[in-house]
Image: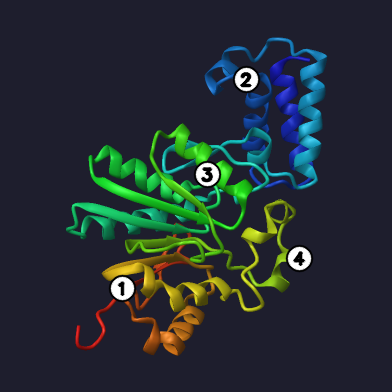
Amino acid sequence: MNQSQLLKLGKERLKQEEIKEAENKAKRLLEFILQQSREEMIRNSLEEVSEEKQREYEEKLEEMIQGEPLQYITHLQEFMGQDFYVDENVLIPQPDTEILVEQAMKKIQSIEDTKIQILDLCTGSGAIVVSIAKILQENKKEYQMVATDISEKALKVAQKNATQNQVQIQFLQSDMFNNLEGIQFNIIVSNPPYIETKVIEILSKEVRKEPRIALDGGEDGLKFYRKILENAKQYLKTGGYVLVEIGYDQGEKLVKLWQELKENCQLKLITKEPIKDLGNNDRVMIFQKVAKEGE
């Protein structure tokens, strides 16, 4: 069987199982198995494929049909124009999260401090903090980055991505703010777990393959936002910003939560309407730390 025939088999197999983006996924999987670029695949379309590689391709197709994300097979996901390593210990970075990075950069550019200090909570693969660090480094801006996650395995992935992208970030194993001491930041950014516990079981097979700890936002999906709003003031400089990614239906819920906590959280909501993502869904909300009365 040549490459073209094997690719056709892959496309048909995934389409038969109603896998989304079947054609693109079949191509990307074969590129990975054969270790060829898209251009090489086109040039070599009539080349025969060994039985071993055919068998490997078909085995991986079956894994995808059972729900295994392509990115966990190839260990690759593009985000903000950079390649990131991913495995089953981290969420797969999604294009909509790029909105969070873009909004963080806008706020960073408005800060006059010589050295920008940034905290990324629930860092996972490190895609957010690494992307921000990469941009700041290219702009020759001095920065201090700290990123936390409760998962030691996730932090190893994040460190791998920082090394791969040649940026300096301090990674700490921490349940949210628990292990942070004595540092105040200009920016706190987070894409925390935000799916309601009961909803997880009805998600797609692919999403359910991602680590539950990175998906489960508690009974109401707001568990981690509550922690952020209650504790951020201790770790944020006056005038600093908190930027969070939210679920498509969480804008009003987060506003209500903030209204419950605002007397003590010392944060002003500066996005009355959530910032939209590429699909016009609610995606990012921004808060700013205000000075206490008398300060």
Q: Quadrant of residue 47?
A: top right
Which residue type does callout 1 highlight? Answer: Gln
Q: Is residue 200 above or below residue 92?
A: below
Measured in 3D between alpha carbons, the distance from the residue under mark 2 to the one under mark 4, in whole angstroms, is 35 Å
Pointers 3 and 2 in contact (C-beta within 8 Å):
no
Q: Secondary structure at mark 1?
A: strand
In the picture of the structure, the residue carrying the numbered disc 4 is: 201
Measured in 3D between alpha carbons, the distance from the residue under mark 4 to the one under mark 3, in whole angstroms, is 27 Å
Pointers 4 and 3 in contact (C-beta within 8 Å):
no
Pointers 2 and 4 in contact (C-beta within 8 Å):
no
Disc with the residue nearer the chain's start (2 vs 1): 2
In the picture of the structure, the residue carrying the numbered disc 1 is: 288
Which residue type does callout 3 highlight? Answer: Ala
* Residue 35 numbered tag: 2
Disc with the residue nearer the chain's start (3 vs 1): 3
Residue 243 at x, y = what percent? 39, 65
**Is the C terminus in the top left, top right, bottom left or bottom right quadrant?**
bottom left
Q: Residues within 10 Å of mark 1 (few under 14, many from 20)?
A: many
